[in-house]
């Protein structure tokens, strides 16, 4: 049994909290940063804002007190959006979390610094916390985890004993965890697939079909792999659950916010207008900028990522972008 602290009571933090608390040997404390929203969660025992319809088990406690949230925790999950992780870490006294297992479940790359979530932890909290930090990623929509739909994820850290401990704590008949030592690859997979989901959504919005979606997913996986390997990830990770698995789920799902944002762009709406209406985070927008800049710095060719970047931030017409992709110089299909 373990006591979990989950920072971030959005869709994913809430779904993970419910899934862990349903394993009755565990106890879970879920931290929501807005005190009024935390009070509502405590009273209603359901997250009507981010995950309606999934009742909280009795052993799931809600708090807006960060120190209390972390007290006595065996494992701490960071499930706030990638762009706010740093501000949350800066509120934590490293002594509160010394020697504890830390797990990152956000899927994104920090804007401007281009740091992965584990690297942000290292930057703010130091080497010891970095060594204890595992990445959790894979095809796992919160809405489906909350409905007990069979789900698999990967947990990664170079220290396999630590990964195996987490694997046992998290796994249950509807949530199966695979072990990986490639934290770089797993973090990059979860982040970069959102750019491909935006691209797929754009083509859905333009009214294209299954042929285009299949092409984007396959060529998109090539691009994720090319950049990921250049950044130190292992090639095989990109063909696994956190790479291909999550990319397929995200690019084909009605739940994906990134695919939705792309679809709205393809329908001709502006990015500002779309984001203004959304309460939930679409990590792919910031990740597109980071992924594009990383590729430029490393001189890695990513045609789809470049076009998504142009559509999002440079006013490129979506249909024109597809035409330009389709009429590039002809290539040999490379193996992954
Ligand atoms: N939703 C999913 O199915 C899913 C699945 C896997 C991974 N993820 C990843 O998990 C992360 C969180 O996503 P989500 O879907 O739970 O997001 P969400 O939009 O549903 O919720 C975001 C949460 O962050 C909190 N928050 C916002 N600003 C904050 C701040 N400044 N300080 C502290 N907390 C703040 C909000 O109160 C809310 O609880 C993202 O990186 C996402 O890609 C989501």
Image (cartoon, rainbow, N blue to C red):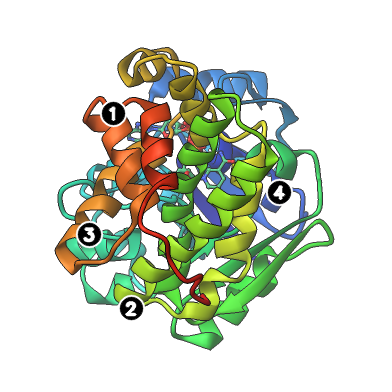
Query: Nearer the viewer's eye, disc 1 or disc 4?
Result: 1
Mark 3 Cα-neighbour bin, 10 Å: few <14, some 14–19, many ≥20:
some
| Location of residue 301 in the rendering, given as x and y in whole percent from the top left corner | 29, 62
Specify which label sits upstream in the sequence, 3 or 4: 4
Query: Nearer the viewer's eye, disc 1 or disc 3?
Result: 1
Question: Mark 1 = which residue?
Answer: 316
Question: Mark 2 = which residue?
Answer: 232
Question: Mark 3 = which residue?
Answer: 294
Q: Secondary structure at mark 2?
A: loop
Q: Secondary structure at mark 3?
A: helix
| Location of residue 2 in the rendering, given as x and y in whole percent from the top left corner | 62, 64
Q: Where 19 falls versus 271 (above or below)?
A: below
Say left or right for 301 vs 71: left
**Front-most of 282 and 142?**
282
**Residue at point 47%, 24% (across, down):** 266
Q: Secondary structure at mark 1?
A: loop
**Residue at point 36%, 52% (across, down):** 328
| Location of residue 36 in the rendering, given as x and y in whole percent from the top left corner | 43, 17
Question: Mark 4 = which residue?
Answer: 19
Specify which label sits upstream in the sequence, 4 or 2: 4
Specify which label sits upstream in the sequence, 1 or 4: 4
| Location of residue 221 in the rendering, given as x and y in whole percent from the top left corner | 51, 61
Query: Nearer the viewer's eye, disc 4 or disc 2?
Result: 2
Asked if marks 3 and 2 touch (Cβ < 8 Å), the reply is no
Is residue 189 shown to the viewer in this render? yes
Q: Secondary structure at mark 4?
A: helix
Q: If the image is split into quadrants, where does the N terminus sit? A: bottom right
């Amino acid at each position: 049994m373990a006591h979990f602290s989950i920072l971030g009571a959005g869709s994913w933090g809430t779904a993970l909290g419910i899934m862990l608390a349903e394993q009755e040997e565990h106890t879970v404390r879920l931290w929501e940063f807005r005190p009024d929203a935390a009070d509502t969660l405590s009273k209603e025992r359901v997250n009507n804002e981010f995950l309606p319809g999934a009742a909280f088990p009795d052993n799931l406690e809600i708090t807006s007190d960060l120190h209390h949230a972390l007290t006595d925790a065996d494992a701490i999950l960071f499930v706030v959006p990638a762009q706010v992780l740093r501000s949350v870490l800066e509120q934590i006294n490293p002594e509160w979390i010394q020697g504890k297992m830390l797990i990152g479940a956000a899927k994104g790359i920090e804007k401007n610094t281009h740091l992965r979530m584990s690297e942000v932890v290292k930057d703010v909290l130091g080497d010891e916390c970095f060594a204890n930090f595992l990445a959790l990623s894979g095809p796992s929509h919160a809405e489906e985890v909350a409905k007990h739909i069979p789900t698999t994820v990967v947990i990664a850290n170079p220290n396999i004993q630590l990964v195996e401990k987490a694997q046992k704590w998290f796994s249950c008949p509807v949530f199966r965890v695979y072990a990986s030592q490639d934290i770089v690859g797993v973090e990059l997979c979860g982040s970069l697939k959102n750019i491909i989901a935006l691209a797929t959504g754009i083509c859905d919005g333009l009214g294209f079909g299954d042929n285009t979606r299949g092409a984007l997913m396959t060529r998109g996986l090539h691009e994720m792999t090319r950049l990921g390997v250049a950044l130190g990830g292992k090639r095989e990770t990109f063909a696994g659950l956190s790479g291909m698995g999550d990319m397929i789920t995200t690019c084909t799902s009605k739940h994906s916010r990134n695919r939705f944002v792309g679809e709205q762009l393809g329908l001709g709406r502006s990015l500002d207008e779309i984001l203004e209406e959304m309460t939930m985070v679409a990590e792919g927008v910031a990740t597109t900028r980071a992924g594009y800049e990383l590729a430029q710095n490393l001189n890695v060719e990513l045609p789809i990522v470049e076009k998504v970047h142009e559509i999002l931030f440079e006013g490129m017409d979506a249909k024109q972008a597809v035409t330009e992709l389709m009429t590039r110089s002809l290539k040999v299909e490379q193996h992954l």
